[in-house]
Every structure is written in C-alpha cells, then in structure tokens.
Image (spheres, rainbow, N blue to C red):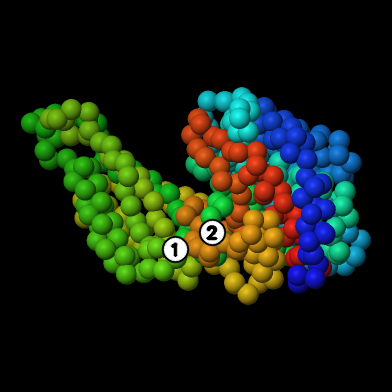
C-alpha cells in the first residue's frame, strides 16, 4: 500500500494545497444561510464553486426537490475503488453568524458543522486533480440537506444512497479528529404525550376523580428507569452502554387543577446487534401498559435519528486512512467510538460500505460560537487527498 505514497507524492500534495483558496470556499459556503430543510441556496453556491473549478456537477433530487444534492466526481481514468467524501450543507436552526477570520481562526454559522469540512474536501479534490496523484480509481463528492435533527430526518442522504450515489468507502468531515471511530450507538428521540378526555378541572370540583396524567407520566418515567437499569448490562468497551433517558417533563397549570396533558421527552441509545424494531416495540409496550392501567391516552413518537453501526477494522479504508493520517501528522489515531450519530451510520447500515468520520479540531458545533483553525482545514484536506491516493488503486 505504501508504495503509492512515497515522500515525493506526500510533498507534492502538501504543496498543492492552497489555504487561501480553501478558506475562500469555506467563507462562500458559510455566507449563505442554510438551516436544515432550506439548503437550496447554499447547494447552488457549492455547484457554482465546483463549476468555477471546472468540475462537472450533477444535482440529483434524491427525494428532496427543494434542495437537490450536489454531486461531482474526479476520475483517474484507471479502474479502481471510489472514495466518497460526503457532507451535509444544512446547519442547526440558530441565529445566523456571518463568516469572519481572525488570527488564523475561521468563525461563522456551520463552519464546524459542516461547511469547513466540506471546503476541505473540495480542496482535496482540486489538489488530486492538479497533481494527478491518484494512480487509479475515483473520488465522489456528495453534499446534501436534511441532516440536523429534529428539523431533518436524514432522508436526503438515504435518498442518495438509494439512488446509487455511494463509493466503496466514505469519509465524512464532521468535527471528530482525535480517534478513528469504528463503532457508534443508534439513537432515537422519544416524545411521549399523555392525555385524558375532558377539560382542566379544579381538584375539589371533580379533578381528583379524573384519570391522572401526571401520575401516569410518573409511571412511564419509572418504567423507563427500570428498563435503563436492565440496559446498563448491555455495554461495549468503546461505545458505552445502551440507555433510555428522560430529559424533559411538562404538565399542569396550577397546583390544585387536574390537567389534561403531560409531556415528556428523552432519548434511547442502543448498540450494534440490537434491532431497532425491537427497541421501538419495547418502548411501545411500556406506553400501552401504562395507558391501559391509568385510563389515559398515550401518544408515543419514536424518531429514529440513526441506527447503530460498527465497521470492520480490516477494511482497506481503515488501513488507507491510518497510513494517510500518519503521513500527514506523524501518527495514527487510536481506535474509538463515535459519540454522536451522523450520516456515516447510514452509509454503513443502508449502503453496506465502510464510513469513517474524520474532520477538523473544530469548536462550538450547535452553538453560536463555531470556530475552526484554518490549519486544521488544511490538515483535513491533506488527510483526505492522501487517503484517496492509498485507497482508490
Ligand atoms: Zn454535522
């Protein structure tokens, strides 16, 4: 494998990366606001940037005509593997922060999550083309909407996978840089609404005789807590344990009135090997038992974010990535778990290929203070380009 990556090639690629050009791309993406489900304008901007660089661009709808995905390829012309760079163009719904650069740090909405990483992936493609460093194979770049929950549901990337926009291995430039994630738990967001018939009523005017939505809600919480104690036995040394967690409860208007509604929400996380259908059924069984026992109506939402995943550490992408990382930084990454869910879970579970999440040491994802050192974006561009050189032949 290392025969493709001599010092001359590494130096050639390193020299070809243009930090100013990379930064300009990141700024151009950040300055177009793109909250989840409204990424059409920034997708158009990315298309414009890529066309300006002479890349051919496809815009498959992939189930989301409001913001068709952006797809481009770099083909060496020689048969080999395809390495995919995939990123989401949408950002969480927070007030827009325009891009600015200060002391080598880039700030602005989506810079950490995930426009900085996408700009690094674009720069890697430019450099691979300019240096003709790829001995064989191809690179496929895909960018899309619908990533951030609860506004998005992951359906856009699923649509791309269904439509065949998938490589033999995938890199995702999310803000995880200190480990090579090989496993991640699945996640579903739970939303439970308990209601009783009728109207709110004073405790002494019949309120006390109504089905009590708060007591029923407490029973749901208690049943979840019992389940969580059992789930704690399902544990993985890297990924941690399965869990069910309640983070929010709301009910009642005043102290002596019987309310008609109690709402609670939380999460369920599970390990690879546990089937999502069983996880959902377990949750629904608890809700229907409590509803029956307390005479209340319970509506339970089970919003699947991503299924659990695990990758095979003997996959060629793992070796190529580690060798590229070592060539770029002097060391390999320790193997670890992915603490969050991302589209990599979908590439592994739905697409059946190995996906590695690796991006810049960026700060402030999902806050108003996103920031990433430009040097980190340059490093990611180098790691991505070197991985392609090693993986694609
Ligand atoms: Zn992200």
On screen, residue 167 above or below 30: below
Report the residue at 28% width, 37% height from top. 250
On the image, the x and y values in percent for residue 356 come to 62, 59
Q: Is residue 363 left or right of residue 17?
A: left
On the image, the x and y values in percent for residue 246 come to 31, 48
User: Is the CB of mark 2 within 8 Å of ligand 1?
Assistant: no
Report the residue at 82% width, 59% height from top. 9
Q: Quadrant of residue 242?
A: bottom left
Circle 2 residue: 179
Quadrant occupied by the C terminus = bottom right
Residue found at the far right of this picture: 77
The answer to which of 289 and 266 lies nearer the viewer is 266
On the image, the x and y values in percent for residue 378 come to 69, 44
Upstream in sequence: badge 2 or badge 1: 2
Q: Quadrant of residue 194?
A: top left
Secondary structure of the residue carrying tag 1 is loop
The answer to which of 16 and 195 lies nearer the viewer is 16
Residue found at the far bottom of this picture: 314
Secondary structure of the residue carrying tag 2 is loop
**How busy is the neighbourhood of tag 1: few (under 14 within 10 Å), some, or many (20 plus)?**
many
Q: Which mark is residue 369?
A: none
Number of the front mark, 2 or 1 = 2
Report the residue at 77% width, 36% height from top. 21
* Residue 38 in view: no
Q: Is residue 51 left or right of residue 39?
A: right
Q: CA distance from mark 2 to mark 1?
A: 13 Å
Report the residue at 11% width, 38% height from top. 208
Quadrant occupied by the N terminus = bottom right
Circle 1 residue: 239
Q: Is residue 337 left or right of residue 145?
A: left
């Amino acid at each position: 494998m290392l025969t493709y990556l001599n010092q001359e090639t590494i130096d050639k690629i390193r020299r070809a990366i243009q930090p100013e050009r990379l930064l300009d791309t990141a700024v151009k993406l950040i300055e177009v606001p793109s909250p989840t489900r409204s990424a059409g304008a920034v997708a158009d901007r990315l298309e414009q940037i890529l066309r300006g660089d002479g890349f051919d661009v496809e815009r498959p709808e992939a189930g989301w005509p409001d913001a068709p995905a952006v797809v481009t390829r770099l083909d060496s012309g020689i048969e080999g593997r395809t390495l995919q760079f995939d990123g989401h163009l949408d950002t969480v719904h927070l007030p827009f922060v325009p891009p600015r650069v200060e002391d080598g740090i880039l700030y602005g909405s989506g810079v950490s999550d995930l426009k900085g990483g996408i700009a690094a992936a674009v720069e890697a493609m430019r450099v691979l083309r300019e240096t003709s460093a790829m001995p064989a194979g191809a690179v496929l770049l895909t960018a899309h909407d619908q990533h951030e929950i609860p506004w998005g549901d992951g359906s856009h990337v699923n649509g791309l996978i269904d439509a065949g926009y998938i490589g033999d291995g995938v890199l995702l430039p999310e803000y995880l840089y200190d480990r090579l994630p090989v496993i991640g738990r699945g996640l579903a967001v739970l939303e439970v609404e308990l209601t009783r018939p009728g109207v709110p009523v004073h405790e002494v005017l019949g309120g006390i005789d109504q089905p009590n939505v708060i007591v029923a809600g407490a029973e749901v919480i208690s049943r979840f807590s019992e389940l969580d104690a059992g789930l704690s036995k399902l544990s993985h040394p890297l990924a941690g344990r399965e869990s069910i967690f309640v983070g929010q409860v709301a009910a009642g208007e005043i102290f002596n009135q019987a309310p008609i509604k109690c709402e609670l929400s939380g999460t369920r996380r599970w390990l690879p090997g546990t089937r999502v259908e069983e996880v959902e059924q377990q949750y629904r069984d608890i809700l229907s038992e409590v509803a029956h026992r307390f005479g209340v109506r319970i509506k339970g939402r089970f919003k699947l974010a991503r299924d659990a995943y695990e990758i095979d550490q003997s996959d060629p992408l793992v070796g190529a990535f580690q060798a590229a990382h070592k060539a770029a930084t002097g060391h390999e990454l320790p193997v670890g778990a992915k603490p969050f869910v991302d589209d990599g879970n979908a590439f592994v579970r739905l697409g059946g290929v190995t996906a590695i999440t690796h991006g810049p040491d960026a700060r402030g994802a999902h806050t108003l203070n996103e920031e990433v050192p430009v040097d980190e974006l340059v490093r990611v561009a180098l790691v991505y380009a070197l991985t392609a050189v090693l993986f694609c032949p």
